[in-house]
Image (tube, helix red, strand yellow):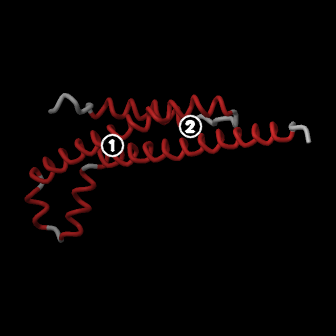
Amino acid sequence: MNELILPFNEIQQELQKMQDFLEITMSEEASEAVQRGNDLAVYMARSGKLVADAKYHRDHKLRSETVSQLKEIIKLPPSVAVKFIDSLMEEENRIFTWTERINRTCTHQLEWCRTVISKAKEEMRNFNFGNQPY
């Protein structure tokens, strides 16, 4: 296997760390949003790689399971064969879906950070404008 591809069990460990981070509720403090946004940008890049690695593992198992189950698959109607093969890769499909969802969640949370920062900037602008002498 390519040494650049993370082993399957390590993908799961990394995903759990990211999941724990993503489940933390952020306050509406701009400074926290900036820090969280910086962390999210890193997680977004890392989770993108994990998506590719999880897909690699899923595709690798798909090939091996298809070959090993070929006699059974040939007997099945095509739609049933596809479901049968998917059932053989239950864990790989779960991890692949999880990596995609983490990546998307990072994107959405990063947008929320931008919103919080924009709100703080607007409030500061309005406060400074309100203190202007007439």
Indicate the position of residue 27 as horizontal and vertical percent values: 68, 35
**Quarter of the figure with residue 34:** top right
Q: CA distance from mark 2 to mark 1?
A: 19 Å
- The outermost residue toward the bottom is 77
- Tell me the tag on residue 23: 2
- Which residue appears at 18% of the width and 69% of the height? 78
Which residue corresponds to mark 1? 51
- Which residue appears at 15% of the width and 33% of the height? 1
Q: Amino acid at mark 2?
A: Glu
Indicate the position of residue 92 as horizontal and vertical percent values: 29, 45
Q: Is residue 94 left or right of residue 80?
A: right
Circles 2, 1 touching at the beta carbon (< 8 Å): no
- The outermost residue toward the front is 134
Classify 10 Å Cα crowding around label 2: few (below 14), some (14-19), many (20 and above). few
Local SS, label 1 = helix
> Relative to 80, does residue 123 appear above or below in the rendering?
above
Indicate the position of residue 85 as horizontal and vertical percent values: 22, 56
